Image (tube, coloured by chain):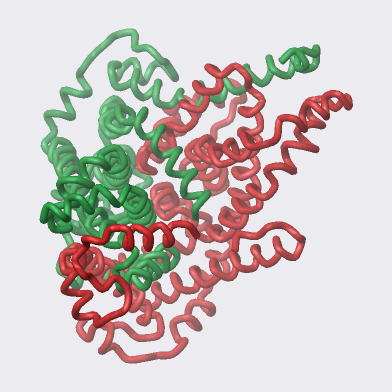
Chain colours: A red, B green
Amino acid sequence: MAAPVIDTLAGERVGKKPPAPRTGGRFSVHFAHYKWLYLLLLPGVVYFAVFRYAPMYGVSIAFKDYVPFLGVNGSPWVGFRNFEDFFANPDFPRLLGNTLILAFLNLGVAFPLTIILALLLNEVRLSILKRTVQTLVYIPHFLSWTIVASLSFLLFALDIGPLFQFLNNVMGTNIDFLSDPAWFRPLIVLQEIWKNTGWGTIIFLAALSTVDQDQYEAAIIDGAGRFRRVWHITLPAIRSTIIVMLILAIGQMLNTGFEQIYLMTNALNREVADVFDTYVYFVGITQGAYSYSTAVGLFKSLVGIVLIFGTNWLAKRFNQSGLF
Amino acid sequence: MKIHNTRGGRIFDAVNYAFLSLIGIITLLPFVYVFAGSFATEAEITRRAFFVWPEQFTLGSYEYIFATPAFVRALVTTILVTAVGTLVQLAFTVTMAYPLAKKTLRGRNVILSLVVFAMVFSGGMIPTFLLVKDLGLLNSYWALILPAAINPFSLIIIKNFFQELPAELEESAKMDGATEIGILWRILLPLSKPVLATFALFYAVGIWNDFMSPLLYLSDNSKWTLQMYLRQVTAASDLLGTGNVDPNYIPPEQGIKFAVIVVATLPILIFYPFLQKHFAKGMLIGSVKG
C-alpha cells in the first residue's frame, strides 16, 4: 500500500505546518483543526442517515403491523406473521414462478448473447465498422424504460403497429403482442436484449483486449482455425470475467426491473406479468398493505443475497476465481 | 496481418461484418421510424406500415403538442427538476467526497464503510416511500431529487480523484491562509471540471429518465414529469388497468405519440457522444476497482 506511506511522508516533509495532531491526540483538538472539513461532511452524513439508513431501519415494519398513525416505532410487533401470510397466499407460487422464469430467460438468452456479440465485435479488424456498430448498439442503454415501452406499444400495436402488419402480411398471423399473456415474456426479453446487450459488451470487450496476441499466432502456426482459436484461447482467457458477470447477474436475478415490468403490465397479462417488484408496488403503494409488502420485499432481498453467496461459493468450489 | 487472409477467414469476415451492420441498423430502426413518423401526416402513418422518410412533411404533430398545456408543463417541469436536481446532487456528492479524501480525518473509515454498505443494502421501496411521506415530500419535486442525492459509487470515484491530486496544491493555498472550503471552491473544483461534468451528466440522465420516483411520489397529475406524461400518451387504452392513469383519458393520434417520444429522447441523443465516452470509462473503473 503505497498511498498511506506517501501521505505520512508528505506530512513530515512539510515542517512549517501548524502543529496539528494528525493521528492520536484528543478528539476535540483534532475536531477544532478540521472543523471546516467536518462541516462539509455534514450534509452527506445527514443524507446517508436519513435517506439510506432510516429506510433500512424502516424495514422493521416487516415484523410489525404498521399503522401510519403510530409510526414505525409505535406499531405493534407481530413476529413473522406477514411472512407466513405471504407464503400461504396463492399469489406466492405464481410470483415466484413468474420472477424465476423471467430471470432464467434473461440469464439464458440475454447473457450469452452479450458474450457472443462481444466475440463478434472483437473479430472485427475494420475499426470504423467496429466503432460505428458499438456507437449504435450502446444508444438504447441511455433511454428510459418509458421510451422503450412506448416504442414497443407503437411497433407491436394491434392492427396498426409496423411489426404487427409485417408479420400479418408475411405469415398471416394476427398476434396481439401487447395483451396476449403468451407474448409477455418474449417481449420483455426482447426489450432487455435491445436495451442492454450492446452496452453489456463493454466489459467483455475490455477483457478481450487483454488477451495475449502471441497465443493466437502460435495457434495459427499449429493450424488452428478461427473457431478453434476462439474456443481454446479467447473463451478461456475471459473465463474469469464471464464468471464474475454471471455471479453478479445471478445476484440480481430477482430484481426483474420494476419500471420495465410495470410499464408492460396490463389488465390482461397480470397473471404472467406480476413479479415480486411490481407486487410490492401494487399491494404496498396502491392498496396500502405496508407491512406485508415490506415483508415481500425483504424476502426477495434475502433470496438475492443467498443467491449471490451461493454462486460465489460454487464458483470457488469448481476452482474458479470467485467474486470475493 | 496476412495470416488471416485464408478463404474461410474472408468469408467469416464478410458474414460477420454484414451481420453486425444489420444489428446496428435494427437497433436504430425504431428511432428512425418514430422520427420520420413525427413529421408525417396521420393519414400517411395509418396507410404505410413502416417508413423511414415521410412523403409529406408536416410539423403538425409538434404544433399540436406544444399547444397542449399538459405537455408543455411536463416538459418545463422536467427540464427544471433535472437542472436543479443535478446541481443539488452534485453539490451533496462533492462536499462529502472532499473531506473523505483526507486520510487523516478521524471517522473517515467508519463513514466510508457505511457508504459501501449502503451500496449493497437498501431499505427498499416501501420503507423509502413511507420516509418520503413522513417527511411531507409527497407531491413535492424534492422527492425526485433528495432520495437519490448521493450515488455512493460516484461519491467514491470523486473521492479517489481528489485523493490523487497533488497535495502541494492545497498546502501552498493553506499557507496563504485559505480554509478548506476556499481550497475546495477555488482550487479543487476548477481542476476537476471534466470529472464533475461526467458525473453531472450521470445524475442528469438519471433524473430525466426516472419513472419510478414520479410514479411513487407524484400523485397529482398537474405535477407530472415528461416520463409520466409519455406513459399516459403512449399506453394503449386497454393497458390502462394498472392505476395512476386517468381512466377518462382518450389516447391521441399516432403522430402525437411519435412527437412526444422524439422530444423525450432528443436530449439524451444530443448528449450521447459525451455519454458514450465517459460512461464506458466509468463502467470499466467500476468493474476493476469494485
Depth check: give the residue in front, A87 or A9.
A9
- Percent across and percent down for residue A141 are 43, 38
Outermost residue toward the right in this view: A222
Residue A47, position as x, y percentages in the image: 24, 66
The residue at 43%/48% (across/down) is A260
- Would residue A97 appear left or right of A28 to someone viewing this image? right
Q: Is residue B182 left or right of residue B120?
A: left
Residue A279, quarter of the rendered image: bottom left
Where residue B162 sits: x, y (%)? 31, 51
Q: Residue at x 43, y 61 (%)?
A: A5
> In the image, is residue A265 above or below residue A169?
below
Of residue A285 and residue B143, the one placed in the foreground of this image is B143
Identify whether B66 is placed above or below A4. Answer: above
* Image quarter of residue B255: top left
The picture places residue A132, in percent across and down from the top left corner, at 49, 21
Horizontally, residue B69 falls left or right of residue A112, namely: left
Horizontally, residue B242 falls left or right of residue B225, namely: right
In the image shown, does A88 or A291 lie closer to the viewer?
A291
The foreground one among A302 and A129 is A129
